[in-house]
Image (cartoon, rainbow, N blue to C red):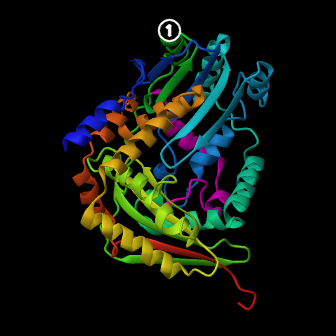
């Protein structure tokens, strides 16, 4: 590392959160971040379950279960949770992704105990009323977000082509044929397998005292028995060396080029350098793709997206060609820029900009209790560490210029990627 880079890194502050942590006897992990600025608190329950944990023929079952978790328990009638949250001026929701299902709320902090009571109750006592009608709701969600959405169709096809064996292949919402064939017993089995204290993290951020949260967590969650289910065997993705191509067309479809590369998961030593490379190549108005494509009128938009997950990561390049510009021209210019990085590397100024951008995003996210909770929980999933957020930025600051050049050569291979084209269907077709 050059003296200039070392000096530059000393003026970028470290990033960490003053987290308090405990683990209950039944395996539930609890993380608290105190913030007494406003009398609010976010409560988030993170389960290690999502489409990655689903079998072929049962895709989307995690998302279906998320819907059913709002149908009430033996002691909480359907709709009462939502009514309570609204009555105290709060908000709540949930989401499912490939590796997690998260239930969250933001309420005045004096209602912390009630929220913990509710969340512990539905961890074990969900009653699954209205299953068939909710299945129709999920199927309709699949139609408008996937079947009737050009970009939804593209993303489903894109991941299914990047991963042929590993369950990242599955769309989070599931394939329609699977949704239509869900049974109530399927959902109950999934619930009983994965919704357990030893497969969950409780995140509490806001105007609370950590010792109070730990006592309440033990009071409400501590009585739930651990399930200690055997870990599911996840298929590995076989090594492959080929170009896989997708071409989607349809009426009113946008013209888009997407390029995808499979990379190692978050804990791999190369992951930080890949994230920095992604920022330099395609994030922000000073990125290389902005310069060579957008500023020169060749694309209306262009950027990168590095999705760092537990098992593998995905490095995506996306560009929208300007009128009259063909996909092949875009692809050629992008490939030329990647080859330039492989040969010449990146500059110290680009590395500094990338680090400052990450730091700024962390600070901005920190202005929201909810987003701080998401950040904490997200690293629990990908790093297997409830305090993993406090090691994230130091990993990025350890990246050297040569690392970026090396990972570009190692992972952005022209003969090992998915190239997807989307075009507007012509009237004559």
Query: What residue do we see at 46% from left, 31% from top?
Result: 376
* 254 shown above or below 271: below
Q: Could you say which is closer to the camera, residue 258 or residue 191?
A: 258
Q: Could you say which is closer to the camera, residue 64 or residue 417?
A: 417
Tag 1's secondary structure? helix
Q: Quadrant of residue 93?
A: top right
Residue 236 seen: yes
Q: Which image quarter holds the C terminus? A: bottom right
Q: Quadrant of residue 319?
A: bottom right
Q: Could you say which is closer to the camera, residue 407 or residue 152?
A: 407
Left or right: 318, with 82 as reference point: left
Question: Which residue is disc 1 drawn over?
Answer: 215
Query: What residue do we see at 36% from left, 38% from top?
Result: 383
* 226 shown above or below 165: above
Q: Which stretch appears magenta? A: 170-197
Residue 124 seen: no
Query: What residue do we see at 47% from left, 39% from top?
Result: 48
Q: Could you say which is closer to the camera, residue 53 or residue 95?
A: 95
Question: What is the crowding at mark 1: few (fewer than 14 residues within 10 Å), some, or many (at least 20)?
Answer: few
* 22 shown above or below 125: above
- Residue 346 is one of the magenta-drawn residues: no
């Amino acid at each position: 590392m050059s003296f200039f880079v070392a000096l530059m890194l000393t003026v970028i502050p470290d990033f960490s959160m003053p987290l308090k942590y405990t683990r209950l006897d039944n395996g539930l992990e609890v993380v608290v971040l105190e913030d007494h600025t406003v009398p609010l608190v976010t409560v988030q329950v993170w389960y290690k379950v999502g489409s990655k944990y689903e079998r072929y023929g049962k895709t989307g079952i995690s998302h279906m279960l998320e819907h059913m978790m709002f149908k009430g328990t033996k002691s909480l009638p359907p709709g009462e949770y939502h009514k309570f949250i609204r009555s105290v001026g709060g908000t709540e929701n949930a989401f499912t992704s490939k590796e997690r299902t998260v239930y969250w709320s933001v309420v005045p902090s004096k209602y912390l105990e009630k929220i913990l009571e509710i969340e512990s109750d539905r961890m074990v006592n969900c009653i699954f009323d209205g299953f068939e009608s909710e299945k129709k709701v999920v199927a309709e969600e699949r139609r408008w977000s996937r079947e009737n959405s050009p970009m939804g169709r593209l993303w489903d096809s894109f991941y299914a082509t990047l991963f042929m064996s590993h369950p990242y292949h599955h769309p989070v919402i599931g394939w329609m044929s699977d949704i239509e064939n869900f049974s109530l017993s399927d959902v109950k089995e999934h619930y009983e397998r994965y919704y357990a204290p030893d497969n969950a993290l409780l995140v509490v951020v806001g105007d609370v005292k950590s010792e109070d949260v730990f006592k309440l967590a033990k009071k409400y969650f501590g009585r739930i028995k651990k399930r200690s289910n055997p870990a599911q065997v996840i298929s590995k993705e076989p090594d492959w060396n080929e170009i896989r191509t997708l071409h989607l067309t349809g009426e009113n479809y946008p013209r888009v080029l997407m390029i995808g590369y499979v990379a190692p998961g978050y804990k791999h030593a190369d992951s930080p350098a890949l994230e920095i490379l992604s920022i330099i190549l395609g994030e922000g108005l000073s990125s290389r793709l902005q310069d060579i494509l957008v500023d020169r009128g060749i694309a209306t938009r262009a950027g990168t997206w590095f999705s760092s997950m537990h098992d593998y990561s995905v490095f995506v390049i996306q560009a929208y060609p300007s009128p009259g510009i063909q996909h092949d021209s875009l692809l050629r210019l992008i490939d030329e820029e990647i080859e330039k990085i492989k040969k010449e590397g990146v500059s110290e100024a680009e590395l500094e900009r990338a680090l400052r951008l990450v730091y700024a995003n962390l600070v901005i996210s920190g202005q929201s209790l909810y987003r701080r909770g998401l950040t904490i929980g997200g690293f629990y999933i990908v790093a297997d560490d409830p305090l993993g957020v406090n090691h994230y930025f130091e990993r990025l600051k350890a990246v050297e210029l040569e690392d970026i050049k090396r990972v570009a050569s190692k992972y952005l291979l022209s003969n090992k990627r998915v190239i997807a084209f989307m075009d507007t269907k012509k009237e004559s077709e």
